[in-house]
Image (spheres, rainbow, N blue to C red):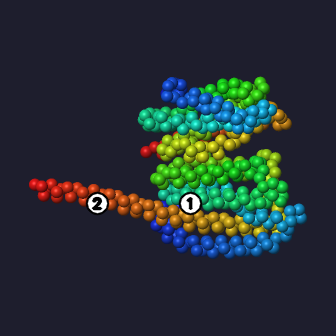
Amino acid sequence: MTALSALIRRDIRIALRVGGGALIGVLFFLTVVVLMPFAVGPDLALLSRLGPAILWLGALLASLLTLDRLFMADHEDGSLDLITMSRTPLELACAAKALAHWLAAGLPLIVATPVLGLLLNLDMVATGAVALTLLAGTPALTFTGMIGAALAVTLHRGGLLMAVLVLPLSIPVLIFGVAASQAVIVGPMTFGAPFSILCALSLVSLVIGPFAAAASLKHGLD
Amino acid sequence: MSLIDLANPTRFLALSARVLPWLAAATVVLLAIGLYQTALAPDDYQQGATVKIMFIHVPNAWLSMFVWGVMSMASLGTLVWRHPLADVAAKAAAPIGAAFTFLALLTGSLWGRPMWGTYWEWDARLTSVLILFLMYLGLMALWRAVEDPSRAARAAAVLTLVGALNLPIIKFSVDWWNTLHQPASVMRMGGSTLDKSFLIPLLVMAVAFTLLFVTLHLAAMRNEILRRRVRSLQMMQASRVAFSSEVGTGSHQENASKGAA
């Protein structure tokens, strides 16, 4: 337990210090959202209708782009070998690393959402709904993306290939995240049904992600 | 004859060479029977002659999921038993499965145009099959991106098993969500709702397409084994050339130094 909490604390510290990539994700999120009005035009009614979709897409891309460093830095300085050889089960270590990554890179996205909601002409309720769905959905993005990060480090290939492999897995999260936020804004569906499916997706990925990532690390690093 | 006897690629090549002609012949015969029965099948009272797209569409759709199932079994073989032919089977199945999925999507949209009035609709069944197609393509990209086959095999196996979660979603998507796509009518609780005059040709076509897959898969596996042999021969040749040139310059220098002495 102490080993895991030490791992989480270490990863958060590295991510927040100079050279860590946590806050670049938020900057990227901001840039993507600011780009959208230039693409679709500054029509406020249209922007408030597309708002949840734009915020979700930005968060998805931001969390995907920060993910490929999840194991890569540890692999380069050798600490990943120590983690795989340690007595702590590799699955738990992977889960701890993903949790730390979500705390350092995922939570700032959710904190930034209300500010970006203003730019997209979303009212209080809509912004709250998007932030709540992001809070429930981004763990799923991190934990499924971790599989891609583990494959990236074992294959020494990052970037586009990993995006191509991981993005199809994140489509359900996007569908139900946007559906739940739209349900609050325009109706006619209830918020509960898509939101519970979103939570279920997060819980499933919480179980599947660490096992798949640990399997690919165990079989791939040699 | 157990699965482990096939672990020897040479034995597999010999056995598959004997089996393949029979499989190919059976496929051709069954496809001919199925197509003949399809031509004889009556028109639907609502859909008219377009109902015959079903006899191509449904087997393709079944196989798109069946092939991912085969790949998942092969992936278990790679990760758990390190069976040497498992990753060959997984690699050879991916392009075939992608082709079946593409044909299922294509025939489905051709069928959807006259029946639903649209080529494409973002409903749960269509979307989940499209995700399956994207995952096939991603898997093929992964196989092509890594030079070392055994390293690529283990990565692809993990990804295949994760992707297998999509299969039950595809199967039950028509029951869970209220979709434009019709609910299951052949494999359902309480028997099929399809009339016999449609059901029998459909089953014949399904068996014929499955045999087609097995034939293509065995042939592709043979090709993959031979391709790997060529690759290792080329690597041996390359290292021999490199080694002999190294030795050659070494002795050359030795001679030169002898001459100088």
**Front-lying residue, B67 or B76:** B67
Q: CA distance from mark 2 to mark 1?
A: 36 Å
Q: Residue at x 65, y 67 (%)?
A: B211
Percent coordinates x, y for residue A127 in the rendering = 74, 27
Q: Tags 2 and 1 in contact by the CB under 8 Å rule?
A: no
Residue denoted by label 2: B244
Percent coordinates x, y for residue A121 in the rendering = 76, 28
**Where's the C terminus of chain A, which quadrant?**
top left
Q: Amino acid at mark 2?
A: Ser
Percent coordinates x, y for residue A162 in the rendering = 56, 44
Residue denoted by label 1: B92
B245 relative to A147 in the view: left or right: left
For this orientation, the residue located farthest to the right is B45
Whichever of callouts 2 and 1 sits on the residue coming sooner in the sequence is 1
Q: Nearer the viewer, mark 2 or mark 1?
A: 2
Question: 10 Å neighbourhood of mark 2: few (<14), some, or many (≥20)?
Answer: few
Secondary structure of the residue carrying tag 1 is helix
Chain letter for mark 1, please: B
Percent coordinates x, y for residue B118 in the rendering = 81, 54
- The answer to which image quadrant residue A138 occupies is top right
